[in-house]
Amino acid sequence: MSDFQRPAHYKETPVSMSKYNDYINDPYFMKWIFQPDELTEKYWAEFIQKNQDEKRLILSIKEELSKLKLKNKELSATEKKHLLQNILAAKEKPVPVKQLRKFSSHILRYAAVALFFLMLGNLVMYLIISNDVSQEDIRPLAATDYSFHSNTAQLLLSNGNTIPLKRNSSVVYKGDKIIADDSQFNMIEKEDSNNNQLIVPYGSKSQITLSDNTVVYLNAGSRLIYPSTFKGSSRVVHLIGEAFFDVSKNKHKPFIVKTDQIDIEVLGTRFNVTTYPENEKIETVLVEGSVSVSNDISSQFEKPVLLKPNQILTFNKQTKSVKIDSVDTEFYTLWKDGMLKFEDAELNQIIHKVERLYDVKIILNDPEKGKMKISGKLNLSENSEDVLNYLSVITRMNVEPINEKNYVMK
């Protein structure tokens, strides 16, 4: 069997299927398949070299996807936009195969590809990487799952360069320079440089100062997609995960944060957005200024909803319902300062945040104890053991290690 053949056991092994999904949900992997260049070839060659146990799987996926023969040059920006719209529409109302047969062979080719990528759940993110599709034309974050191939934070530039970052990293755009932690780089970008990504896996956090002096704090398990410089009539970024935004004021150029289902538009303000793919809700918490929240897919928004300071807007992804409440914003924003504050919060919620922040797994010996309500402040020490010890004290439960990243509470 050659390296490009699918392993005989592939379809029968759940672990392999999970890894399969990890790769097809990675936009840089998709770029390597459909828009290979010297940088992507080098990156994935090095990745395969370091992960020999996954070489056969990676190459078999590459062969399978390459059969589609969908090259970026074959689709115009308009065609890509229409393809994306069809996919998003199909999520609400799948098209029967019999109806597809009525299409012309030209349309059927794209429809087949659209359905394939709908199954993968990541064509939208792949289109972000494609340089001839404007970020402002499409909503690029419809993927329901997003995986991180590295446990190290990274800055993935639109020119293909990858800059590794520290666990608690800092990135600053300053003139024609990028200052990443302790290193400085010349900003050599393509004319269309909208697709830079700051990738922050579990166990890491990052702070980035964008070209307009807006400061964004990214929580663990998050991605920010942004341009090197803001051109046009607005400043648009895309978010997966959680981030706190301190937006520089510019009354002539609104700042827009796009998530998979809602947009948050501001002129200059401070607010927090939580939009993890696995969460059923998207939360926007306003600390200062004002924000306008809208949705251009769902009909639930007859007009944009305005938030006032100390308010939270909760958008339910399933029901498309919107709820606004008054809150203590510290419960939602202190994570950026290295602290969690909670009051009558379920233990399950606290555990989930700790798992994300420290890239660990905590199992409750008695699942019913996950409903326990606790209050207090949790200092997010560099050492996860300190945090786990504190959880042990306030819950009066023992926290025992299973291995390096797995613990049980009982």
Image (cartoon, grey):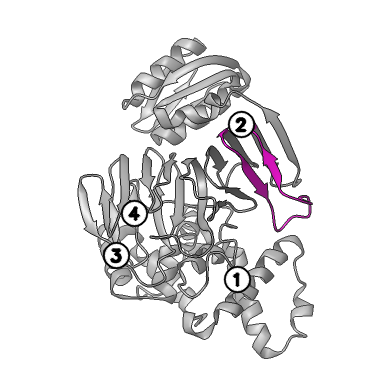
Residue at mark 3: 43
Give whichever of discs 3 and 1 has the lower sequence position.
3
Residue at mark 4: 155
Q: Residue furthest front?
A: 252
Residue at mark 1: 116
The quarter of the displayed image where residue 284 is located: top right
Helix, strand or loop status at disc 3: helix
Above or below, 87 against 350 in this view is: below
**Do callouts 1 and 4 mark residues in contact (Cβ within 8 Å)?**
no
Query: The disc labelled 3 sits on which kind of residue?
Result: Tyr
Query: The disc labelled 2 sits on which kind of residue?
Result: Pro
Q: Residue 124, how many percent across, how many down?
A: 56, 64
Please report the bounds of the magenta region as a residue range.
287-311
Above or below, 376 against 11 in this view is: above
For discs 2 and 1, the disc positioned in front in the rendered view: 2
Q: Is residue 279 magenta?
A: no
Nearer to me, 19 or 347:
347
Marks 3 and 4, how far apart at CA: 14 Å
Helix, strand or loop status at disc 2: loop
Give whichever of discs 3 and 4 has the lower sequence position.
3
Q: Residue at x 29, y 63 (%)?
A: 161
For discs 3 and 4, the disc positioned in front in the rendered view: 4
Above or below, 263 against 76 in this view is: above
